[in-house]
Amino acid sequence: MGMHSLSMRRGGRGRQAALALVGTATVGLVTVAGMGVASAAPSPVDLLGLLQGGSDTTEVNEDLVPFTEGDTRPEGSAEVNETFGAPDGGGTGSLQLITPDADSKVQAFRLSDTPLADFVGVAAYSAYRSSESTATDVQFPSLQLVIDFNGDATGGFSTLTYEPVYDDGASLAEDQWNRYDAGSAGWCSTRVIPGTFDDGETQCSNGGVVPLSEIAANNPDAVGTAFGFNQGSGNPGLISAVDLLTAPDTTYDFEPKGEDPPVVVPDPTDPDPTDPDRDDDDKKHDGDKKHDGDKKHDGDKKDHSYDGK
Ligand SMILES: [Ca+2]
Ligand SMILES: [Ca+2]
């Protein structure tokens, strides 16, 4: 760590701001994060990000911004740390997710306003399952897409879920990072979507795993209103981590920001802590301005209690 990594992190934030300035698909980012950058001139850092062509990665630090914890229930936890490291290209850290018992649930979601079709062939993430987990072998953190499948028409809410266990050929290996191309795979729906998920086909039941491309094609007005990770409820003892969540236009890299270098501030009230008793009468050590020049007390051994105290 140090100045080099610090400047790298600032570069990452600069790229995020630059993307907000030039990208029509990042309207949600401006709205959600409250970044008033639309009319601001790009700073030198923003311009550097543009020149580097690195407008496709946004770092997410300990505060999870622009994600929020959503429907997180005790004792579910989400923490950006380096416990399980990171996948290739994902820096040094990731988002650790723990659900100790069956009722535990943890989420990290980001609001969006993006056509569902834009996620097709694009959505992806990396996940790690620790062998310390006691959960059923096939369980991994899922990727979820909250959608409004009929656009401006009334209703249309559902949550689409990608889980590796329903993705033929996807790795379920523990203690390693696995990459899931969810945008090219099948998804489940929490609710009926007429013509796509019939009654009885929700929650992955009765063949209710449908390619995302088919869901989008059947519902051309569908909009992704939020996306992110979910673990639980029903995942007791699952210890995992996720990273490099790829959404339209941006990949989110979960990384500890770390601490800035400490700033050393001299203590002006105690210039010579090794010699406290000789403070006032000793010009070499005297640094206590409050008592300097006090003729009535300085140098008077009997008034020692007034001097330098
Ligand atoms: Ca990372
Ligand atoms: Ca609607």
Image (cartoon, grey):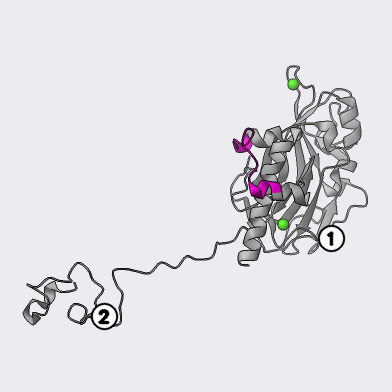
Q: Secondary structure beneath disc 2? A: loop
Say which of 275 and 189 sits in front: 275
Residue occupying the point 22% across, 68% down: 289
Q: Residues within 10 Å of mark 2 (few under 14, many from 20)?
A: some
Which segment is the magenta one? 32-47
Q: Which residue extends farthest right?
A: 169
Say which of 189 and 50 sits in front: 50
Residue 227 image-quadrant placement? top right
Indicate the position of residue 80 as horizontal and vertical percent values.
64, 56
Instruction: Check the image and report above or below for 38 versus 286.
Output: above
Residue occupying the point 64% across, 59% down: 7
Indicate the position of residue 250 as horizontal and vertical percent values.
76, 44
* Apparent side of residue 69 relative to residue 124 in the rendered image (left or right): left
Q: Can you identify the residue that label 2 sits on?
A: 285
Residue occupying the point 91% across, 32% down: 214
State whether the magenta stretch is mostly helix, strand or loop: loop
Q: Can you identify the residue that label 1 sits on?
A: 173
Instruction: Check the image and report above or below for 147 versus 235.
Output: above
